[in-house]
Amino acid sequence: MEILRAKYSDIDEIMQIIVLNQRWFKENHIDQWQDGYPNSEVLRRDIDAHGAYKAVINNEIIGYFYLSFDGEETYRDIYDGSWSSDDKYAVIHRICLKPSYKGQGLSKEVMRSIEKMVLDHGYNTIRIDTHQDNFVMGSLLEKLNYHKCGIIYLKSKAQRIAYDKILKGVY
């Protein structure tokens, strides 16, 4: 598997993956990505910000994520807990795989690739959030030793569970 920067020409294929994940969330009664988000305009902004990445196997895009080193406004306030560190941090958003590739260990592989990218960028901490009913993502994060830190609220006022991981000494 390769992790490559996503391009405008990848948007349609990535949107197909997002739509499949939106359906999966709906079928599993997870109220995440059910409001037209993310959409192609969000992906364009991700690409413009140089944080859009695709996971590729045999020239097929099988996953997508956005990685930012610019902080996250909604992470300023955390409730029922605290972040593990006040150090500068990277943020993972919009991470998804084609459902047909789930259960093969590729999510762990993508996350480990992201962690190495973060370290290579000179950062030592990653933050991520997920819907409280997204047990698949929560379980993955806990298996990868992410720390459940508390609750954050998106701009839409939607509640999310916040996680972080200190990478020092991991690799």
Image (cartoon, rainbow, N blue to C red):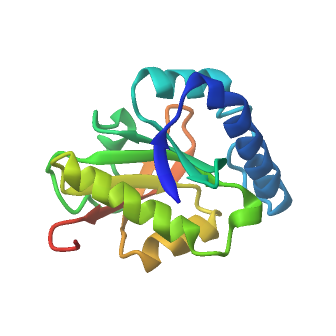
Q: Residue furthest bottom?
A: 143
Q: Is residue 148 left or right of residue 122?
A: right
Determine whether 122 is above or below 137 in the image. above
How many marks the image carries: the answer is 0
* Spot occupied by residue 152 in the image (x, y as percentages of width and height): 43, 49
Give the position of the C terminus as an image quadrant.
bottom left
Q: Decide which of 83, 141 is in the foreground and name it.
A: 141
For the residue pair 38 and 59, the one nearer the viewer reads as 59
The residue positioned farthest toward the front in the image shown: 58
Closer to the camera, 54 or 58? Answer: 58
Question: In the rendered image, is residue 91 in sight?
Answer: yes
Give the residue displayed 34% in from the left and 53% down from the top: 127
Residue 20 to residue 27: above or below: above
- x and y percentages locating residue 26 in the rendered image: 82, 53
Q: Residue furthest right?
A: 27
Above or below for 39 versus 31:
above
Which residue is at 52% across, 34% downward?
6
Q: Position of residue 124 (x, y in %)?
A: 18, 56
